[in-house]
Image: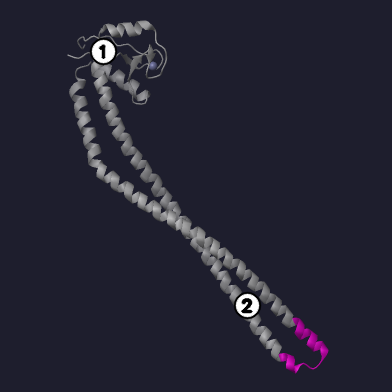
Amino acid sequence: MFKTIQVLQKIQKIDLEILAVEEERKRYAAEIEAITAGIESGGQAIEEASAEIEGLRARIREADDRIAQSNAKVEKDEKRLNDIKNSKEMNALTKEISGANKAKRQCEQDKAALNAKVDEKTLVLKEKEEAFRAKNSELERLAKEAQVNGPAWQEAIDKNTEARDAIKAAIRPEILRKYEMIRAKRGGQGIALIKNETCQGCFIHLPPQVYIILKRGADELQFCPHCHRILYVENADPAEAV
Ligand SMILES: [Zn+2]
């Protein structure tokens, strides 16, 4: 028969293995969730950037229309120059022509600025699309890995649970409950080794008698006064389980 603390050591080892598998499974799920959210917002950003570029292109088409209108007006006005009868009319027409030319130059400047903006936004859009594709393939990879690993994870959990069930009867149920309670509060670690008179769970110095009692091998549980973990020593003398 094993001592209570030795059974607890075995249970702890099994529990940590189960915990490691569960954490890996959770890590995958969390990564998949985060990347899915990233893809969603990335897709939205692409839509927004595309709409913005579309808006700029519409404004470029408007500028083109205005440039064409100005050209038509200048052409028409220049034809009328031949029919001018006096200097008053001449002045008015010249003013019209220079006004139309000025408007045209302004439109051309606007158009150039809009084109530059389209180029700039197109670069940003391309980057967003690239990131979107990268995220999608990352998601594909993660989902595939999770799918491939799934059965192995489950098998490891099942096997460990089975092994745990097979040995837990060797200790009193209230001790197992106590261990589980401490474990739940202490990051999955219900027992701790004493090394150099220090609890290896919380690294607090322990009174020497704790070590002496445990080293003697009596089947009496000792608890860390600080973190309350059940303490054990290496190579204690064997004794019978309770
Ligand atoms: Zn401790």
Q: In which quarter of the image is residue 92?
A: bottom right
Nearer the camera: disc 2 or disc 1: 1
Range drawn in magenta: 80-95
Decide: is 114 above or below 235.
Answer: below
At a point 72% along the width and 91% down the height, the residue shown is: 80
Question: Is 124 on the left-hand or right-hand side of 91?
Answer: left
Is 25 part of what is drawn in magenta?
Answer: no
Question: Is 50 on the left-hand or right-hand side of 84?
Answer: left
Disc 2 from disc 1: Cα separation? 93 Å
At a point 40% along the width and 45% down the height, the residue shown is: 34
Which amino acid, mark 1?
Asn
Figure disc tally:
2
Which amino acid, mark 2?
Ile
Is ligand 1 within 8 Å of the beta carbon of the residue shown at mark 2?
Answer: no
Is 83 part of what is drawn in magenta?
Answer: yes
> For the view shown, which residue lies furthest in the right direction?
87
Disc 2 designates what residue?
67
User: Residue 235, which numbered label?
Assistant: 1
Looking at the rendered structure, the secondary structure element under dot 2 is helix
At a point 22% along the width and 29% down the height, the residue shown is: 161
Question: Is 150 on the left-hand or right-hand side of 136?
Answer: left
Indicate the position of residue 89 as horizontal and vertical percent values.
79, 88
